[in-house]
């Protein structure tokens, strides 16, 4: 059997079609409002974002849930990462909290 006649194994690099990808600039032609980066932040003032985050942490239900997580062994770092992920539009707040944790 000739090498040219052999098919590449499924899943191998040789079997990948180089043209089976989106063309360059494809993401610029679609509506990206369904993604987080396609929506402007609702709160742009870092002070306002920090105040809102602190206020939400002071609610009894949220505070109790956080204490439960700490009691079960979830680290503060993991809780902060989740909070930053959920509040991804408040990047400055996340950076501030990470800096504060580094200095503790």
Image (cartoon, grey):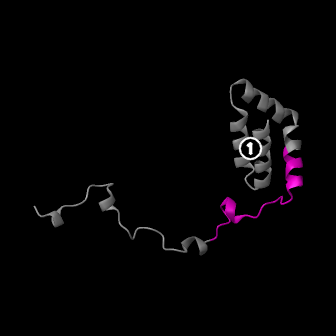
Quadrant including the C terminus = top right
In the rendering, at what x and y percent does residue 27 appear? Answer: 58, 70
Viewer-closest of 2 and 100:
100
Q: Residue furthest front?
A: 103
The residue lying at 79 percent from left, 39 percent from top is 103
Specify whether residue 90 is in view. no
Say which residue label 1 marks. 83
In the rendering, at what x and y percent does residue 96 appear? Answer: 80, 48
In the rendering, at what x and y percent does residue 88 appear? Answer: 73, 53
Q: Residue furthest top?
A: 71
Q: Residue furthest left?
A: 1
Looking at the rendered structure, the secondary structure element under dot 1 is helix
Viewer-closest of 61 and 83:
83
Viewer-closest of 34 and 76:
76
What stretch of residues is rendered in magenta?
31-53
Residue 77, placed above or below residue 8:
above
In the rendering, at what x and y percent does residue 77 appear? Answer: 70, 37
Looking at the image, residue 88 sits to the left or right of residue 8; the answer is right
Quadrant including the N terminus = bottom left
Q: Is residue 41 magenta?
A: yes
Which of the 4 image quarters holds residue 32? bottom right
Specify whether residue 28 is in view. yes
The residue lying at 22 percent from left, 61 percent from top is 7
Q: Is residue 81 magenta?
A: no
Viewer-closest of 11 and 33:
11
The residue lying at 73 percent from left, 47 percent from top is 84
Mark 1 surroundings: few (<14), some (14-19) or many (≥20) residues within 10 A: few
């Amino acid at each position: 059997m000739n090498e040219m006649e052999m098919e590449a194994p499924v899943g191998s690099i040789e079997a990948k079609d180089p043209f089976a990808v989106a063309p360059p600039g494809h993401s610029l032609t679609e509506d990206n409002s369904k993604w987080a980066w396609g929506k402007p932040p609702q709160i742009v003032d870092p002070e306002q974002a920090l105040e809102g985050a602190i206020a939400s942490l002071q609610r009894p239900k949220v505070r109790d849930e956080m204490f439960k997580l700490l009691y079960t062994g979830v680290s503060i770092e993991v809780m902060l990462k989740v909070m930053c992920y959920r509040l991804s539009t408040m990047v400055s707040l996340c950076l501030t909290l990470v800096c504060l944790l580094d200095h503790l």
